[in-house]
Amino acid sequence: MNERESFDGTDQRDNETDQPVTEPPDTGADDPEGVPNETEPSTRPTSGTNETELEYRSISADSERTAATNGTSVADVESIPVDGSEVDLSDPTYYLNREHSELAFQRRVLFEALDDENPLLERVKFLAIFTTNMDEFFRKRVGGLKQQIAAGITTKTPDGKTPTEQWVEVLEESRSLFELQSRCYREEIRPALEENDIRIVDHEALSPETQTRLRERFESSILPTLTPLTFDPAHPFPFISNQSLSLAVLTREHPDAEPTFSRVKIPRNQVRLLAVDGETRYVPLESVVRANLDLLFPNVELVETVLFRVTRNAEVRRNEEVAEDLIEMIEEVIEERRFATAVRLEIEPDAPDQIRDILTEQLGLDDREVFELEGRLDYRDLSELTALERPDLQLPDWTPQPHPRLEACSDESTIFDVIRDRDILVHHPYHSFEGTVQRFLQAAANDPDVLAIKAAIYRTASDSRIIESLLEAARNGKQVAVMVELKARFDEKNNLEWAKKLEEQGIHVAYGTIGYKTHAKTSLVVRREDDSVRLYSHIGTGNYHSETAKRYEDLGLLTADRDIGQDLASLFNYFTGHSMSQEYRKLLVAPGNMRERFTSLIRAETQRALNGNDARIVAKMNRLEDPALIRELYRASIAGVDIDLIVRGICRLRPGIDGVSETITVQSIVGRFLEHSRIFYFRADGADRYYIGSADWMSRNLDSRVETVTPIEAPQLQTGLREILETLLCDTANRWVMQSDGSYERCRPSTDEPSEDAHETFMRLAGITGSR
């Protein structure tokens, strides 16, 4: 499975198969790798306190609470001696900084663009993904740091850094990443596109005839959409919208006049790459606008033009506990985000001092927040090129496959019959979302025996078939209750529109919960069978979103287990009521029993290791941040538990520290699909406990969100999860191994072995896995 052992404790492969390749420190050529960052918003759990402030406070004593498990006392596990003395596991040197860890992930994302083994248009896609991810990082994380600095907060993170120290460091580290991205585009991607007859040219490089045609097009179609906004004594400084590309223009009416500043926004509702002279030659829209500014500013001298782009803080959330109307509050948040504090200015190099000074002064920016970048300032629109019909430059298309058990469903049987027979584990995007989860809810909407449907919606597509199924169920006379999380950051508007539409059909809609963000991905179907009712449940690791289900790797359980159904019924009663249960038959629920249960599971393995028995933990998640659980993992390692962590992004734990984390490995899988599922395995003296669900091991997930994690008890499904974890830990195409200092080394096969790509393996086996 990996360098250590398989799940049953037997040796499986030796160290020579996976050979890490250390990245060169300057070029980053062997550094980053990745996939799109899940836009996963933060929480606003208490009045007047933002998420970033909460994260940098000390973890309370409640974070350490857990009951004794299998004879393990809290004192026994918390005071494990090392070399005759206790280790102070609160020492900042044992923790990585969250922001630096996030940037290490973004470096791996950028590596996918740098890696010439990837098809060219795949590399182009990752240039765009990197920009999107870094935009979000600045809006959420850097914006939060700046907000803390303004509030005078000096509380240190578990790794011992103040907000100001982090702000300074992440700006500098981000600068090197942006320069690497720019150099990659200029020196590698753009020339490679030209070699493949895809040319992105400046307006000046076009023939006079083509320039004339573009001028006519500009005058008829583009010019009417432009609005020059001047800054002078008669006009206030114009509002610069978030992440918009703009031209700063200096003009003067006569040679002796002082130049006047104007801003022209490059419209987002126009095609960014204008096709000229055929289908594979493109000129950027901003280049056409810049070349024809005389039509926008007639009878004045054009002195200078400079492209720039502004990023604004996303941390404008209101105090929901005093908001009289949550819907009104969310609408205000969406509006206020447009006017939030600026956190970054990207600008072309060698900009005149007048333009730079006006922008930094009016936007309230420090010089350290200004990024002079050669090449493009916004790579997001390069994704337009990935739609080209160039299979020679792209990865082969992948179509999610039917789930074998559901595909084999006879005409006489229903999906409920198949689920009732035995549980189903679905694996997206290898198994079709439409043919599994969407089919489940669609069948429920039209089944005459279904009495009620309940669902928790965190994110969904703008044209969601899931929502349409719920509307259809209501029209068919079924009781429908939906928890729509209005506080899902950047999806508030979409969710608000769906919530209103659901209410119009008489559906019971809950708009989130006070103090918590609902991140659970669950649905419950109540069906009349044999003079009683049976509960059918879906618990997933990903959103009810048909489009992201084609790109994000996720898992879901379809089950008729009554205990799980009853647990979900209690949870949905909390959504529409106000009283939250702390006790559940099988589910791990945050903020109820989840932290305590995970802590108990880790401590049980710790005690087994102390007793001289084999102990093992394998945990796959998106982020590992919670200091309390990290301390538990350190104690487990000190006791001798073998621990493999597959953490796609942020990880504050340091593996491989002598005497503290020697038995822990941290690995990151990033490649064609976004690894998004959460899987937790504990050996439990051979009892093999597996769990999947929506929660990462982050303080916000365990304490400030409503999350669900379910046990997977069916032996066939446990086998499927084991094979998934083993495949990931054998990957030599997409896997990176973290070093103790937080850097990552890429795994490569030895010279005499083929590369093992987990995503390729799962695609190849999609029609087989799940048939058990």
Image: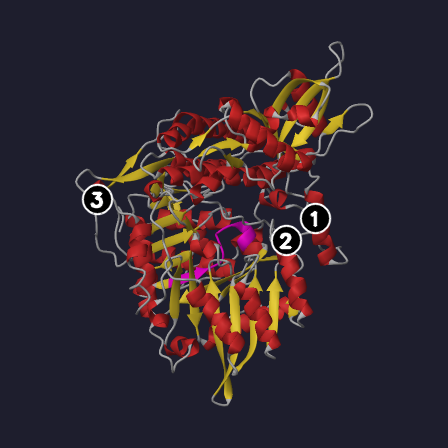
Which residue corresponds to mark 2? 492
Q: What crowding class fits label 2: few (fewer than 14 Cα within 10 Å), some (14-19), or many (20 or more)?
A: many
Secondary structure found at label 3: loop
Secondary structure found at label 1: helix
Q: Residue at x 50, y 90 (%)?
A: 531
Q: Which mark is residue 57?
A: none
Which residue corresponds to mark 3? 754
Whichever of callouts 1 and 3 sits on the residue coming sooner in the sequence is: 1
Which residue corresponds to mark 1? 333
Q: In this view, does 521 lie to the left or right of 713?
A: right
Residue 129 x, y percent position in the rendering? 47, 41
Tell me whether the residue at label 1 lies in contact with that at label 2, contact meaning CB atoms closer than 8 angstroms.
Answer: yes
The span from disc 1 to disc 3 (Cα, nearest Å) is: 52 Å
| Residue found at the far right of this picture | 234
The span from disc 2 to disc 3 (Cα, nearest Å) is: 46 Å
Q: Is residue 268 above or below residue 524?
A: above
Q: Give the range drawn in magenta.
A: 690-701
The amino acid type of the residue labelled 2 equals: Glu
